[in-house]
Every structure is written in C-alpha cells, then in structure tokens.
Amino acid sequence: MNADQERRLRGWLAERHPGEAPAALRSTAADVPFVTRRALFPVLEDPLAHVAGRMTIVRLLVYLALLLAVALAVVGAALLSRTPFPPRGLIAYATNGADVRLVAADGTGDRAVTSTPDDLEHAPRWSPDGRTLAFARILDYPRSPLDDPCAVVGSIVLFDVASASERILATGLRSIGVVEWSPSGRQIAFLQLGADCTSEESGVVDVASGLVTITGLAPGRWALRWTGETISTVGASIYETMSREDRFVARYSGPERDLGGHVEIRDRQTGDLVDLGVGGGPAWSPDDTSIAFIVPVDRPPEQGIAYRDRLVVADVDGWHVRVVADIVHPAYSMVDGVTSFDVVKPPPLHWTSDGGAIYWLDGVGKAQVVDIATGRSAALPTRMHGCIDLHWQPVQP
Amino acid sequence: MIGRAAESDRRLAFTRLVDEDLDHAYRIAGVILGNGADAEDATHDAVVQAWRSFGALRDLGRFNAWFQRILINVCRDRLRKRRRTPVTELVVARSKTMPDGFAGIDDRLALNRAFERLSPDQAITVVLRFHADLTLEDVAARTGVPVGTVKSRLHAALAVLELALANQEVPTR
C-alpha cells in the first residue's frame, strides 16, 4: 500500500468513527456502574440471541426451571383466587310471613332463623365479616304499630351463625324499617319512626355496648348510607340511588318499563348529567365506580313462557357501558299461578360485597345471580318461599 | 464494614478507569463495526464483561490494554454474528452535507464494500493498526495472536483494500 492509499484509508477510518460516547454509556448510578438500554432490556432486544449466545446450558436450565416455577405459581394463584361461581356463602332472607331464614347459595339447608308467630322480623343484613346477621324485630299484637305507630315495639337482634344463637342488641325502639352495618362492623344504623310518630328518624347502635344514639329526624328518607363510620340518610325519592361517596346520584324517571324511563347519572359537584338510556333499578357497585341497571327488552307477556331483560353495567362517568347478561324472566302466571310479583318494575338489583356479582330476586322466589366478569348466570335451585328481601353473605377469601 | 469499603473503592476505581477510556473504546468499536448503535452495544458489553472480571486484574496500570482486548473480542463476536446475518445494504445518495475532505464518495463506497469483505480479524487488525495507531506488537497483544499472525492478517486485508482504493473490483471471498 502506497502513502496515498494509506492516507485515504486512514481518512476513511477516521470518518467512520461515531464520535463521542453517548451519555447512556456512562456510569449513572453508584450501585449499577453502567446502565444502558441493553442492560435494562437485554432480552427484549434479541431474545434468541441472548439465550443462545450468552447462556451456558446450565444457566439456561436454571432459567427454564425458574420460568416453570413462576408459571406454576401464577397458575396456582389464579386457581386459588378464582372467584367461585355462584358465590359461596349463605343467603339471608325475610319472608312475607315476617320471619328471617337462611339458605345456602347452592340451594340447600333452607332453615329458619326466627319462627315467632307474634313478632315481625325483617331487614336481615350480614356483618362485613359475614359472621353475624342483624335484623329488626317488631313486637306484633297486641301492640301492633298499625294500631299505635308510637308504640315502643322495636329491637335489633344479632344472630351468630356459627353458634346459631341470637342476642338482643338494642330494644325500646319504635317500628324499625332499615338496618345497616357500618364498614367496620362496630356500629349498626337504623331508621325508625320518630318521636312525632309520623316521620322517620335515624339512630346508631354500638355493637359492643348496645348503646343507642338517635342521630336525628329524617323525614321522607328511606335509606341509610355509611361514609366511613359516619351515617347519613338518603332516598328522597325511591327512583334515586346515591353513590356512597355522595357525589353521584342515579335515578330513573319512572318505575314502569312500559313508560320507557331512562337511567341518568348526575354529578352533584359539576352538575353533569349522563343519560344511560332506557332502563331502571340502578344499583351502585360497592366501590361506587360502576352502576348496574336493567334494560327491558320484551314487554311482559300477558300469556306466555318468559320475557327478557338485559343486565347492563356502566362506569360512573357513563362512558363504558356493557351488557353483562341477557336475563330471561319466567312469566309468573304461567309458571305456578303466582302473580304477586310486580312485573312492570325492574327487579331491585344487589351487588355481592366483593363487587364480583349482581343478584336479585326473581318472580318465583329464586335468587338469580350474574358474574360481572364472565356474564355467567345462575339461579338458586330452590325457591325461597315468600322471600321479600335478601342479602348475600360476604365470604372472606 | 471493611469489605463494604473495599467494594466501594473497587467500584470507584473501575468507574474512573472506564470513564477515561470510554470515548476511545467507543470510537474503536465504531470504526470496527461501522455504526454508532453497534458501537454502543459493543462498548457496553465490553464494560459489563470487564466489570465482571475486574477482580482478576491485578495491575490497574494495564487496564487500558486489558479493556481494549475485551472490547476487541466483543467486536469480533459481533462481526462474526453479523456475517451470518443477511444485511440489506442501504444506498447512500451523494449529499452536499457529507464531508469530502480526504476522498471522494467513490472511495468511501469502495472502502465500505471492501471492508465488509474482510474477515473480522482482518478488519480489527486494520483498525488497530491504521486508526488506533498501535504498533504491530500492541495489535498482537490486543488481539491475542503472535506478531506474525498480525502481519499476515494485515497483508491480506491491505491487498483487498488496495484493490478498492485502486478502483478495481474486489474479488468476492
């Protein structure tokens, strides 16, 4: 190679070099001397080359064993944590005979919690840990609240499921309509007839001591809501349901499916109103992030086998609306002649405490339940005779 | 506590030595591999390898040669791998923004083609000799071969490059 050729070669080599080393190559952390994109994402860049070129057979086997272990752990955890369907636990329900009963979610073991011909028991509610059932008891004849609205006839009763024993938590109350546990399970709120014997008042019972505190008059209110350990009354209209954190109110403009009432969500802070379309019976999820409601599909037949509704869940902002399941209702008069259930109203919906399923009482006294994630539906295989109110037991994972 | 302090000192020493040598190493890798991305990867790999075996280096005064030898090995591996991978050559158009101080575009294209036809060891030898300006002995030390082997590699490589610089067709290997 002559001098000119060498000069040209050196020039070409000099031009070929890429300049200063990029900052990414320099030490950026005391503990990791050289962090670059390759160090952070070595496998992503060229996974096969990485495995083939850098690993010894032994190391590769170790990595494969680790991957297998991780995969087994993930699958095992998924199997263990998979929510059973239908949800496990007991369903507590009040009957039109004014007693409280329990039935397992698989339809077995239907049994009475109370069997008191002279008393009226209703409003069964599970404690947050699912161990204790609270319900209201009203002494019947001769001190019927129908005869004397101001009669001191009410009690709140606790029923321990494990020991099948009951305990009177508070007594000396008036006619009680609603019972709700606080999130901690340390208090129970109730609505009863007030001292004026015409409007409602709210109160709280301390579960440990049984101490009763009347929190105030609540005229026209029919529901209670706990925000943390603070109670408030809601329900100015039976066509409204307030989210627990009090910001959103869902309402539907009419109870009858034939009238085409719409479900609306109103943001009480901003005043925004979202119309979710034709539907009814809105119910907020336990975490207030979603709302479920019924969209009628068929008119209930005067004669026939069944009619359809659609169970819909929407995000609180109304943007993500999805049909969870198509519901087929039995046409009651054709099933067993029972027509007492008001088919013109959507059935009141309830969420399980973990927010994983929605359930309701159908017209023949069976609990229907739908898994939110999969849309699978199931019906309690046996009827809850005379059921007018039900509550699914929270089951601890 | 003493062990932790010694570890910290070792990190500091390594970081200082690499930082001093990093630009030079990156340039060498860039010239051998022909692009900045590959140079970055090769330099990084060399640094990581050096860090892993830094404890085996007894004489820190020889860090530069030791590190360059690691770098050369990494570049060789990458060149070999690249030769096994089909590469689509991009056609570079003449541009006024390209520097043209030493030679015309024809020189560059010819040398590019010729350089790609060198074996990885020949290419590395050329770069160390004519870009890094190492003596034949130092090239031998960096590449881990006898000086005679360096000479033969250089001879074969220059024969190919001379043909390119003479604007003659370089025979396919």
Image (spheres, helix red, strand yellow):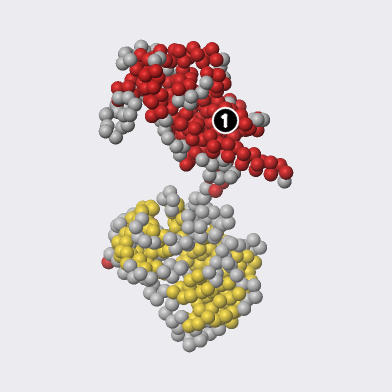
Please give left or right for residue A210 compared with residue B90 in the image.
Answer: right
Q: Residue at x 42, y 35 (%)?
A: A19
B78 over A197 or under it: above or below: above
Q: Residue at x 50, y 63 (%)?
A: A391
Residue A338 occupies quadrant:
bottom left
Q: Please state which of residues A193 and B36 is positioned toward the viewer in this rendering.
A: B36
Which image quarter is the N terminus of chain A in? top left
Figure disc tally: 1
Where residue A110 sits in the image (x, y, percent)? 55, 59
Tell which residue pokes out farthest to the front in this image: A3
Residue A359 occupies quadrant:
bottom left
Task: Rate crowding at label 1 as few (under 14), some (14 to 19) or many (20 or more) other CA atoms within 10 Å.
Answer: some
Q: Please state which of residues A222 and A270 is positioned toward the viewer in this rendering.
A: A270
Q: Is residue B7 visible?
A: yes
Please give left or right for residue A175 compared with residue A291 in the image.
Answer: right
B105 over A27 or under it: above or below: above
* Residue, disc 1: B64
Tell which residue pokes out farthest to the right in this image: B2
Q: Please state which of residues A119 and A313 is positioned toward the viewer in this rendering.
A: A313
Q: Residue at x 52, y 21 (%)?
A: B135
Q: Is residue A175 visible?
A: no
Q: Residue at x 32, y 67 (%)?
A: A273
Where residue A107 sits in the image (x, y, percent)? 52, 55
Where residue B117 sits in the image (x, y, percent)? 40, 17
Where residue A32 sits in the image (x, y, percent)? 57, 42
Q: Please state which of residues B56 and A326 is positioned toward the viewer in this rendering.
A: B56
A162 over B113 or under it: above or below: below
B105 over A26 or under it: above or below: above
Identify the secondary structure beneath mark 1.
Answer: helix
Protein chain holding label 1:
B
Q: What's the residue type where badge 1 is placed? A: Asn
